[in-house]
Image (cartoon, helix red, strand yellow):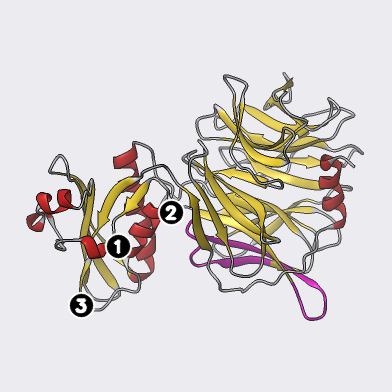
């Protein structure tokens, strides 16, 4: 049976798992491959005064930079001194240990669970400060601020916007003592910290999709015995059922302006691509073909939609205008290409491809028409670009269970994100978060 047909079989009858998952357990991140040599960076432990902060800003920054695969944090035991601002920096000391970048700072308790954070970044070779700021935040906001510092460092050093201050959504599945399955839709920081359960169900949850402002998730739930599409507000859990048509309701995808959802529906008998206006519930059908059309994804400018179709005989990626006109086949390499979504530049797609060696994650270049395969396992699924287009999050298997993994868009950096226990699937990387 074709893999695409299997997708609809799953949508119709749901999923099961025999794995267990710890509810409060953060993701463990193992870097399995990095660049040949990352930027050597020394992150000096930030000086603290007053009440000890609930989170170590410098530890979070160091961990962020290290897991990016683009930096090589130097061991603190090699530091000849530990400065905390520009007046204490002796560049010669840092050149001796071959540091190229230096991060220093202070965290001062100012009372009322408020902390003043000072941060400075130095280019050791140029003997100059590159960035720095003061910020006052609550203890609860320290982790987010630390990720924003990491983003700033990443951008200053690499020239590319960082994506540490973002979140991921994913689904875990566990088997209960009575034999029933428990499906959890969860949201966590990009480093896996602070996972929160958004929805718990005995039935399958699939295809989480972030709204452009990161305030809502759309997803497919089988809690009423068949697939339905919901939109849920993350701040208070309020949710609305937006697609409960006869047949399959699946694969929601937000338009860039956040007013519409593209999705796959079989309300008229055959799975087709539709667009729903979220505010007035007006529904527009875009495709009309005997083949199966599913998995829509919008271009960053909202003018085009890519989708998966087997109208050529096997699953391939097609593109059309946002009004359904101008349908064109995009992919021709391999026997299977599916689950495509755009990078922020609008010139690349990440997708699942099979070119004879299993189902792997690839990046398709819209200009050259070539697909670069990034992974080497045989059953990779659900790729999702980071909002800066530099990394791709996806689901795969490791040790017989479902885990999340990430690979850089050039294939040079790889890491596995996994629970110590449990089965994890259906990842989605959020857009950039907009506020502290």
Identify the residue under disc 1: 58
Q: Quadrant of the C terminus?
A: bottom left
Q: Contact, CB < 8 Å: mark 2 with mark 1?
A: no
Residue 403 figure quarter = bottom right
Badge 3 marks a residue whose secondary structure is loop
Identify the residue under disc 2: 67
Residue 395 drawn at (x, y percent): 65, 52
Q: Contact, CB < 8 Å: mark 2 with mark 3?
A: no
Residue 339 figure quarter = top right
- In the rendered image, residue 197 lying in the magenta stretch gets the answer yes
The CA distance from mark 1 to mark 3 is 17 Å
Tell me the mark number nearer the camera, choosing from 2 and 1: 2
Q: Is residue 45 visible?
A: no
- Please indicate whether residue 179 sits to the left or right of residue 260 in the image: right
Question: In terms of depth relative to the viewer, which is nearer, 217 or 142?
Answer: 142
Q: Quadrant of the N terminus?
A: top right
Q: Please give the name of the residue rendered at 87% of the width and 31% of the height, measured from the top-left corner.
A: 291
Dot label at residue 50:
3
Question: In terms of depth relative to the viewer, which is nearer, 230 or 427?
Answer: 427
Q: Please give the name of the residue rendered at 88% of the width and 47% of the height, measured from the top-left corner.
A: 247
Q: Which residues are magenta?
A: 175-199
Residue 353 drawn at (x, y percent): 70, 36
């Amino acid at each position: 049976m074709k893999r695409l047909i299997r997708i609809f079989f799953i949508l119709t009858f749901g999923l099961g798992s025999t794995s267990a998952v710890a509810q409060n357990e953060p993701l463990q991140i193992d870097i399995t491959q990095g660049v040949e040599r990352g930027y050597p960076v020394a992150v000096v432990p930030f000086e603290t005064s007053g009440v000890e902060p609930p989170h170590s800003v410098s530890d979070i920054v160091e961990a962020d930079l290290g897991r990016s695969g683009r930096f090589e944090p130097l061991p603190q035991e090699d530091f000849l001194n530990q400065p905390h601002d520009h007046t204490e920096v002796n560049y010669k000391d840092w050149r001796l240990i071959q540091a190229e970048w230096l991060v220093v700072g202070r965290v001062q308790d100012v009372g009322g669970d408020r902390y003043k954070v000072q941060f400075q970044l130095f280019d050791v070779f140029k003997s100059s400060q590159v960035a720095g700021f003061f910020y006052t935040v609550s203890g609860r906001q320290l982790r987010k601020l630390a990720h924003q510092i990491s983003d700033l460092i990443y951008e200053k050093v690499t020239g590319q916007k960082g994506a540490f201050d973002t979140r991921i959504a994913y689904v875990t599945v566990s088997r209960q003592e009575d034999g029933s399955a428990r499906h959890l839709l969860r949201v966590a920081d990009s480093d896996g910290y602070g996972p929160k359960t958004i929805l718990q169900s005995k039935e399958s949850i699939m295809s989480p999709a972030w709204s452009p402002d990161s305030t809502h998730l759309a997803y497919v739930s089988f809690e009423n015995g068949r697939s339905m599409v919901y939109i849920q507000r993350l701040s208070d859990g309020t949710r609305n059922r937006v697609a409960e048509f006869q047949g399959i309701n699946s694969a929601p995808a937000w338009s860039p302006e956040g007013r519409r959802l593209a999705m796959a529906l079989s309300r008229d008998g055959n799975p087709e691509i539709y667009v729903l206006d979220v505010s007035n519930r007006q529904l527009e059908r875009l495709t009309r073909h005997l083949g199966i059309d599913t998995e829509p994804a919008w271009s960053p400018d909202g003018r085009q939609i890519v989708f998966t179709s087997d109208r050529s005989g096997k699953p391939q990626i097609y593109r059309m205008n946002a009004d359904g006109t101008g349908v064109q086949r995009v992919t021709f390499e391999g026997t299977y290409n599916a689950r495509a979504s755009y990078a922020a530049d609008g010139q690349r797609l990440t997708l699942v491809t099979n070119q004879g060696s299993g189902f792997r994650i690839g990046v398709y270049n819209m200009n050259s028409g070539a697909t670069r395969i990034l992974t080497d396992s045989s059953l990779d699924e659900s790729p999702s670009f980071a909002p800066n287009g530099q990394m791709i999050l996806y689901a795969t298997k490791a040790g017989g269970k479902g885990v999340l993994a990430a690979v850089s868009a050039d294939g040079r950096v790889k890491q596995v994100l996994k629970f110590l226990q449990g089965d994890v699937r259906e990842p989605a990387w959020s857009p950039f978060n907009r506020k502290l």
